[in-house]
Amino acid sequence: MPDALQALLDFIGRHDGIGDKMQLARLAADEFKLIKDRAVYCCADYAVRFSASETVNFGNTVASLSRLQKYDDRPFIACVVTPQRNHCLLANTTFLKKVSHSSQALRENNIRGSFNGSDIVRELEGIENCAANIQRLFAIHAGVGFEGNLPRLVEATNGISPTGVKFAIDASSWTNILAAPARAIRFAASAHAATLKAELDAQVEKYRAEILVAALIENVNVRGRVIEYLIAGEDEALRQNLVSALRNGRSGPPAFKTGNALGDYSRRFEAFDTETDVKTKVLILNSNPKAYNLDKVLEFLARDRSVFGFYFVGIDPGRIVATTLVSMFQQDLLRATLLLRHWAGRNSRGVAQFEGTAINDLIESDDTRIDEAAAIAFLERVANL
């Protein structure tokens, strides 16, 4: 996908000044053998909608939400043809503020309405929405997807709040939250950390063959859920169903839902209560793993024994490269944590996500260092959202 998408972006850039959206669309369709689906031109790697405007700040209708749903698993480009330049914006659901037109009946079970150019955000967490950043931005979107964005869009469009409660921090909770980095440092230095990693490593070794088969699943969210359940799932019957499906080469794993708990693996030690979220990373793919719900993590850290971390499994085609167990406050991981604040509705501070390139480095480094001051500053920032 990156090469095909870059070829399109370069092609559009070379035609700056063409000033005619229909001519540019025809040229792109011929050059890249794109299929026309109403006003959208698509291929397996991306979809693009050409619009005309005097400036990049345009209000034209781009597409219906239902049409975007068809293509939200690949970069969806809004190409704005202005007299001097052609501007490319990423218009996947992650980058929509709301749905504008005919959307009064929009619900999570009723996909309605269309979005305009003015509904597309122009930057996300300091990253400008432009051609140069589209591949980086799509990696953020891929970790959330259509289903992850839909509740936010319903709330933003019609004021219908999803379930959930913004965690209220009192004095006692705040004391425990601020002490969380120090707890994490003590845990990482203890024998308990080695015990926890050994338990998870044993599961990886036990299901190594199945994990490598599951790593071939194209859908990033399904792939992650399957591998994470093999390692840390609690329902043994479901795990064995997954194992059987993967071993027998069935067309896909059985449908299943995972819970909304903070972590996948709970473990109580003498002085610590740990929650560990299992994350897989296919190292050759540019993707950003989901991190955590900010209110849930604050609520957990408000307990005086709490330690929250991640167990990362790095996979290359045909082999498991390495595993690592780190705190949420590990210094490189913390620097790679994005706070997606436009998820924050009335009942939420939002969610966090990790930049995938940093995860690749972390998986092979075995570095568990925590900068306590930086971690406390991060917690203060989250609490104030």
Image (tube, rainbow, N blue to C red):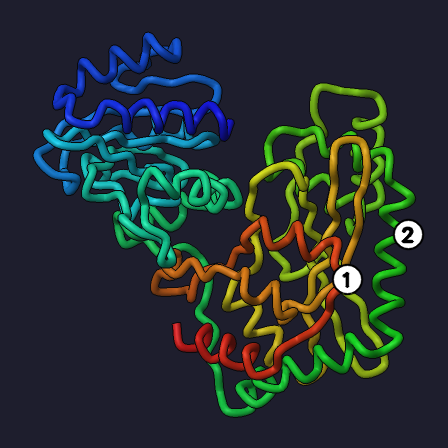
- Look at the picture and state if 326 lies above or below 375: above
Which quarter of the picture shows residue 310? bottom right
Q: Hey, what amino acid is under mark 1?
A: Asp
Give how far apart the Cα atoms at labels 2 and 1 are: 18 Å
Helix or strand or loop: what does disc 2 sit on?
helix
**How far across and how far down the image is residue 267, in percent?**
80, 67
- The answer, for residue 238, to whether it is visible in the render is yes
- Look at the picture and state if 298 lies above or below 122: below
Which quarter of the picture shows residue 20? top left
Residue under the image location 39 percent in, 43 percent down: 133
Residue under the image location 70 percent in, 29 percent down: 216
- Give whichever of 317, 147 is nearer the camera: 317
Q: Which mark is residue 366?
A: 1
Q: Quadrant of the C terminus?
A: bottom left
Mark nearer the N terminus (2 vs 1) = 2
- The answer, for residue 147, to whether it is visible in the render is no
Q: Which residue is mark 2?
A: 202
Which quarter of the picture shows residue 368? bottom right
Mark 2, residues whose alpha carbon is within 10 Å: few (<14), some, or many (≥20)? Answer: few
Residue that lies at the very extreme toward the front in this rendered image: 14
Residue under the image location 24 percent in, 33 percent down: 114
**How far across and how far down the image is residue 227, in percent?**
74, 41
Q: Hey, what amino acid is under mark 2?
A: Ala
